[in-house]
Image: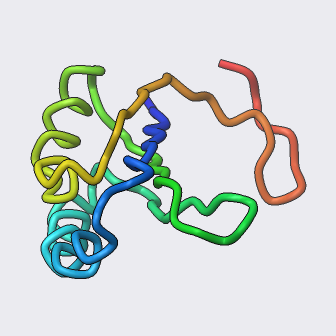
């Protein structure tokens, strides 16, 4: 099943936390590439970092939670919160997809 993970950053977190931990964060994403299909930062209206988004393929929400907890950015306090939602693609590359 596919899941969307939406991360919200702590607004007053030290911006250096992101810079310092980004290599380890990207290492995690690379090592989890079979599960993490896509990932990237989110920005607010002023183009300031505001969080991130992952698209994850996993057997359960618990598997996704385990992956999130292994993320170095989670342990630093940079992430204020995260939400996991099951997701089904119904439109991709300009085409409707069959409904499951």
Q: Nearer the viewer, residue 99 or 7?
A: 7
Above or below, 31 relative to 61: below
Q: Where's the N terminus, which quadrant?
A: top left
Residue 36, given in percent of the width and then of the height, sits at 34, 54
Q: Is residue 45 left or right of residue 67?
A: right
Instruction: Give the residue at x 27% y 62%.
Output: 33
Instruction: Give the residue at x 61% y 63%.
Output: 43
- How many numbered discs? 0
Q: Is residue 69 left or right of residue 34?
A: left
Above or below, 92 relative to 89: below
Q: Nearer the viewer, residue 95 or 18?
A: 18
Q: Quadrant of residue 64?
A: top left
Q: Is residue 5 left or right of residue 42?
A: left
Q: Where's the C terminus, which quadrant?
A: top right
Residue 24, given in percent of the width and then of the height, sits at 13, 73
Q: Nearer the viewer, residue 82 or 35?
A: 82
Residue 71, given in percent of the width and then of the height, sits at 17, 53
Q: Is residue 96 left or right of residue 37?
A: right
Q: Nearer the viewer, residue 100 or 35?
A: 35
Above or below, 20 relative to 47: below
Instruction: Give the residue at x 49% y 37%.
Output: 4
Residue 59, given in percent of the width and then of the height, sits at 27, 25
Instruction: Give the residue at x 76% y 29%.
Output: 98
């Amino acid at each position: 099943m596919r899941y969307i993970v939406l991360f919200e950053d702590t607004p007053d977190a030290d911006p250096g936390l992101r810079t310092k931990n980004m290599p380890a964060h990207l290492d995690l994403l690379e090592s989890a590439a079979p599960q993490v299909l896509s990932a990237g930062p989110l920005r607010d209206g002023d183009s300031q970092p505001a969080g991130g988004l992952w698209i994850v393929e996993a057997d359960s929400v618990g598997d996704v939670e385990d992956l999130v907890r292994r993320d170095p950015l989670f342990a630093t306090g940079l992430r204020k919160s995260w939400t996991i939602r099951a997701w089904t693609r119904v439109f991709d590359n300009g085409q409707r997809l069959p409904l499951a």
